[in-house]
Every structure is written in C-alpha cells, then in structure tokens.
Amino acid sequence: MSGPSNFQPKSALLQWTERRLPILGLMHSSFVAYPTPRNLNYWWTFGGILSFCLGVQIITGIVLAMHYTPTVAGAFESVEHIMRDVNYGWLLRNMHASGASMFFIAVYIHMFRGLYYGSYKEPREILWILGVIIFLLMMATAFMGYVLPWGQMSFWGATVITNLFSAIPGIGPKVVEFLWGGYSVDQPTLQRFFSLHYLLPFMIAGVVVLHVWALHEVGQNNPAGIDVKSDKDTLPFTPYATAKDSFAMVCFMILFAWFVFYIPNYLGHADNYIPANPLQTPTHIVPEWYFLPFYAILRAIPSKLGGVIAMFASIAVLAFLPWLDRAKTRSAKYRPLFKQFFWIFVITCIGLGWLGAKPAEGGYVIASRILTAWYFIHFLVVLPLLSYYEKPSQVPASIAESVLGKQPLATAKAKGSR
Amino acid sequence: MAKSTTMNGEQPTRRDFLYIATGAVGAVGAAAAAWPLISQMNPDASVQALASTEVDLTPVAEGQIITVKWRGKPVFIAHRTKKEIEEAKATQLRDLPDPQPDEARVKKGKEQWLVLVGVCTHLGCVPLGHQGDYKGFFCPCHGSHYDTSGRIRKGPAPSNLEVPPYEFATDTMVRIG
C-alpha cells in the first residue's frame, strides 16, 4: 500500500508465490517497512485498537448468530438461552455487547485525536471522510444490533429512531412503513435488522481497507502536525509502531475484560431485560451511551423536522471539517486559541451526552439548547474565524527536531550512547 | 474514441448514439432488476390483510381509557367524562398548533367516546392517559402534551393524535379499521 517493495522472501516456494501474487510484499511494505513518524504518541494506537474491536465484534457476532432466533416470539428467549445454556454463551454475548461500547470509546478517542492534531487537513481530507463514513456505518450497525434482543429499550429505540424518517415532508410516513415492512415495528423489522446487522460489519471492513489505503498513500499525521521531510523523521513500522500498538492494545484489553467480567450490564439499560411490549412505552427512553450527545441535539430543537435535521447535520458537519478549518498549522500544539476551543468543544460533547440521558424538561432543555448551539458554532463560526485571526506559535523545522531538540541529530545520538 | 465524440466540436456520430443507447438500456435493466429487491421491503400481503378489530364498549366505565391493538399499534378508546368533553369543546381553535374542533374528532351523538391511535405523532411512543398539562395524554419520551380530545397543545409533536377509521356497529360495539 505504499509503493513498490524490495521485499524478497528467502524460500524458493515463497519466491514462486510472490512472483504470482505479491501479497507478502504488500504486507511487508504496509506493516513492517512502512515508515512511521518517530514522534507518534499513544493517541496514535487507537487505529490498531479499532481493528481489534471490529475483529472481536465480527467473530463473536458470527458465533452468536448460530444461537440467536430473529423472531418476535423467540428473540428475547434465545438471548437468555445464550446467556444460560450455550457453552460460554454468557462470555460471547458479554463480549459482543460490551465490545460495542469499547468500539465506540475507541472511535471517539480516535476522532478527538484527529480533531486535536488536525489530521483532517490537506492532504488527508478523503482519509477523514472515509472515517466519517465508517462512523456512520458503526452507528447504523450498533443501532440495529441493539434491537435484536427485543427488550423494551430495543423495541422503543427502534420505534423512535425509525420514526425520525417520518419527519421527511410528504413521503415520510411511506418511508417509515418501508423501513418497518408493516405499520409498526414488528416481525419484518426485526428480521431485516438482523440481516443488515450481519451485513454492515463487512461493509465497515471494506471501508476500513480504503481508510488504511488512503492513510498509507498520504502518510500518518503526527503530534507536531508537520510533514515527513527526511528519513531522520521516521522509524519502521515494525518493531516500533507494532510494539507500541501491541502494548496499548493489551492495556485496552484489560479495560475491555473489566467490563466483560465484572460489570457487563453497566453500560446497558435494565429495561432491556423486560420483553418488548408494543402497547407500553418505558417512562424514560434512553439510547445507548454512545448516541446520547446526538439524542440531546435531537431533543433540543422544539420542532420535529428541525430536531431530525439538526441531529443528522451534527454528524454531516464533520465531513466538511477540512474546508471549515482552513488554518495551515495542523497540530493544536502550535495553535494556542484552537487548543482552548478544542477543550471547550470536548466539554460540550460530554455535556450533551450527560443531558441526553436526562428527561426532556426544564433546565435540561435550556442547557441542551445552549450546548447544541455551541456545537454548531464551534464548527461553523469558531473554526473558520480562527483560520484567519489566530496567530500560531513557532512550528519545529522537522519531526526529528520536535523530538530531539535543536541540536543536530549526530550529537543527540552521541549523547544517547554515552 | 476522442475523434468521434462531440468534444472536438463535431456532430454526434452513430457511435455516440450507440454508447448512449446501450447505457440507457443497461440503466433501465439495472433499475428493473433492483425493483423487486426494493419492493420486498414494503408491507407484505399478510401484513396488509390484518383484519379490523371489534371492541365491546360495555365494560368501559366513564373516565376510563382502554388500549386495544390494531395493525400492531395501540388504539386508545377513552370514555370521556362530561368535564373532559366540555374542556375539549371550550378550547379556542387559535390556541391549537394543529387546529381541529372536537366535533371533527368524535362521532356525532357519541361525544363521550374518543378513539385514537395511541402513537405520539412525534417519534412514535405510546402516550400516557390522564396526564400532562391538559389532563389528556402525555408522551414521556420527549414531553408532548395532548388535551382531552387528543390534540397537541405543547411539546415537539407536530400534529394531533390520529383518529383511526372506525364506526359503531351497534350502540356498544365499535369496529376499528
């Protein structure tokens, strides 16, 4: 994925294969010899962690599908059957359910890292947009997966989210019936959601390939936000990035295991252990935690169509980010004002998430409106203005200099060996 | 190919026509092939054939709201009290986001019976009876308040609770659908 490789396998058999399908060379140039900026910090390990998450979800998901029944009468019971009867079913289901949350924790860190270090800027626009597409696919997959256990939150979450499309003027109600395959969320809805929930992860995997391809074409961004200028600025992917990624991944697995083994239901909702009842809505419908900021934006707007538009716009605006923030300096390290606004934005998102879990009344609504307004102001007003008015601080001349200081590389090496 | 296209300012050639015609037939073919794949998503015959529901009203006491299932959705049948009917009638149309008189939402001579699809017009939750600021219906999901005629008064819902097609088969028997 990064130009021709001079990789030559030693064995005659592999040389024979390599001449016909240069897959080892592709792997070697992508994940062994691939030059990575030498200043990458641990925030850069989340790409690998996300691949791991996708793998876990696909593997546990395929196995769960061997025991799950996508029918209105059987879905809830089959999930309990997995939990109680199937060998290690409890483990597989907890991994899959907690795995979804882990996936979103990792993707949000990955996205905020991109925001902080300006990873969306020229020449990484397409890389960034592919990431936004992956995020959208993840949201669709997670939403449909949450419907499958057919508990109260599954059913009413599905009802509320599919009804978002009824806000489309004119054809809205027809679109919703089309999505449902009926006049309410029912058997056809559950069955198609199961089918699509199985399909989408493979589409995510496909877009991930494009994402990595684009990444290896333009090269990784780095904490200094400056381009690689010489070989001194880079280190080979293996062993440097491989070791760092592996260590971070193991730390992440500890967190993952803590959720799976000790608090598997912590991020879920108790109401989803009540079988779906189409005649009774739970008093407080809340989506899974990773959707809460967007849910807060939906509820903040006092109009149905307006709320739906604002919610979709809050994600769509990300795709336009490379053209909203025109500042030449990438990294927030050298953008004193942007850095402050970045942290205000992080607090805004966390605040929206907190408000999304609160009932839609009184002070919560007012706070949601203020934060929703700020969310859009950040992208549509603050970032374009900063591009013109902010005076960035001195950016180091090279990546090597940002790591080793001003002294020439030779002396730095000599000092290290003393 | 460049020679034969209009990019050189020449007239469209026979080859241009064939390209466009082939492309057009291919597009029609692709659309025709996609149609069944898309159409299968719509409600199928068995779902559409769901029969109408008949409900005996004799056990429903004044002030009581019952919920029955019709087409997979909840339908409220409210036996309204005199006070509730008067409140619904006394409401000025200009106070309503979706103006509709109470008479248009009930059958003449049967004003005590209010029949509604129990689905909030905002995002489809089931509202709770005898609750909210207007003592009609209140949707707990996003805070829409409906009055004793099921009309939206406050909150994000855009329109009144839907009145399903129904008729009185006898004095005490209602047929929905």
Image (cartoon, coloured by chain):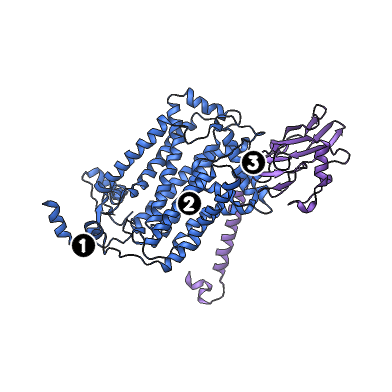
Chain colours: A blue, B purple
Mark 2 residue element: helix
The number of numbered discs placed on residues in the rendered structure image is 3
Q: Nearer the viewer, residue B110 or A99?
A: B110
| Residue B48 appears left or right of B172 | left
Q: Position of residue A234 (x, y in %)?
A: 25, 56
What separation in Å lies between label 1 and label 3 (alpha carbons)? 66 Å
Q: Where is residue A249 in the image (x, y as percent from the top left)?
A: 33, 41
**A249 on left or right of A143:** left
Q: Which mark is residue B109?
A: none
Q: Label 3 sits on what residue type?
A: Gly
Depicted A379 relative to depicted B56: above or below: below
Q: Which mark is drawn over residue A348?
A: 2
Return the residue nearer the eye: A406 or B42: A406
Residue carrying label 3? A181
For label 1, the residue is A406
Say what secondary structure mark 1 lies in. Answer: loop
Chain for numbered disc 2: A
Give the amino acid type for the residue marked by disc 2 in the picture: Thr
Q: In which quarter of the image is the C terminus of chain B?
A: top right
Residue beneath the point at 51% across and 73% down: B7
SS class of the residue under badge 3? Answer: loop
Query: Relative to A204, is A393 above or below?
Result: below
Please name the residue shown 49% across and 43% down the image.
A290
Q: Nearer the viewer, residue A311 or A241?
A: A311
The chain under label 1 reads: A
Instruction: Give residue B90's position: percent from left, percent from top.
Output: 82, 46
Dot 1 amino acid type: Lys
User: Mark 2 Cα within 10 Å, few/some/many (few <14, many 20+)?
Assistant: many
Q: Which of marks 2 and 3 is in front?
A: 2
- A403 left or right, relative to B11: left
| Residue located farthest toward the bottom when viewing the structure as drawn | B9
Query: Measured along the vertical axis of the image, is residue A388 above or below residue A154?
Result: below
